[in-house]
Image: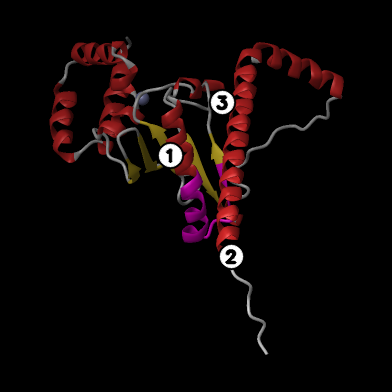
Amino acid sequence: MVLENIETIRRKILDQLSNYPEDQVREIREQVENATDEELEEFVMSQQNQSHQTQCIFCEIAKGTMNSVKIYEDKDIIAVLEIMPASQGHILVFPKEHKHFIQEVDDKILNKLMNFVKNISPIIIKMLNAEGISIYIPQGQIAGQGIPHFVINIIPRYKEDKEKIVFDWQREKKENEELEIVAEKLKKEAKEYFKQQTSRDNREKEELIVEKKKVIEEKTEENKEEKKIELPKFPRKIPN
Ligand SMILES: [Zn+2]
């Protein structure tokens, strides 16, 4: 490691200290300032060798070792305000457990995350006077996922931010034949999953039919009972 780099790293570590709870800051600052270049190099290397859980800022936020402005927290998920927001009210909601990609997140937890998005969205519109919301989930470094921890960005959209936040791509019309080739590729690989889904749908449909039949039968029984009661056992007197 070059000496200039060591100084840059020392400065970087000190800059990041503002994110840590106050009681820890003084101790870390002293250690970093007093560390020799060799000690600092060793420290950085050991940090790099540790697992994601100790390096990842989202894991740090989840553990409470890094300060954040929390909106919501339970045992599985946490939602905080982005420290460098794209717009006012930019929320990050993520699983507490370190997961890189969406496919690694447990269904139950994914459901919790999406439910949070669903319920907070109208509140953002109402309370922050946003006109819309962009829900942004980068997957992989190329997509802008700088830290390998699955995060859903909830970005309120305002007229004045329209130029600042851009989700755009060069639009180019493709022929159906070309699209079919892509669709086939995906459908072939996803065949098993799709089959599971459709058989689940069919099972649910069958269960629903059985349930409906039961309700109809019960109602017919009730009607019979009612009719029995309604029927007078003696002839009614016709009023004069
Ligand atoms: Zn993490």
**Magenta-colored span:** 118-134
Q: CA distance from mark 3 to mark 1?
A: 16 Å
Q: CA distance from mark 3 to mark 2?
A: 71 Å
Magenta stretch encompasses residue 172 = no
| Residue that carries the numbered disc 2 in the rendered image | 230
Instruction: Left or right? Give the position of 84 relative to 2.
Output: right
Residue kind at label 2, given as amino acid type: Glu
Looking at this view, is 8 or 209 the one in front? 209
Q: CA distance from mark 1 to mark 2?
A: 63 Å
| Residue that carries the numbered disc 3 in the rendered image | 143
What kind of element bears circle 3?
A: helix
Residue at 14 percent across and 24 percent down: it is 31
Residue 72, position as x, y percentages in the image: 35, 44
Looking at this view, is 129 or 220 the one in front? 220
| Rendered-image quadrant of the C terminus | bottom right
Instruction: Left or right? Give the position of 221 relative to 110.
Output: right
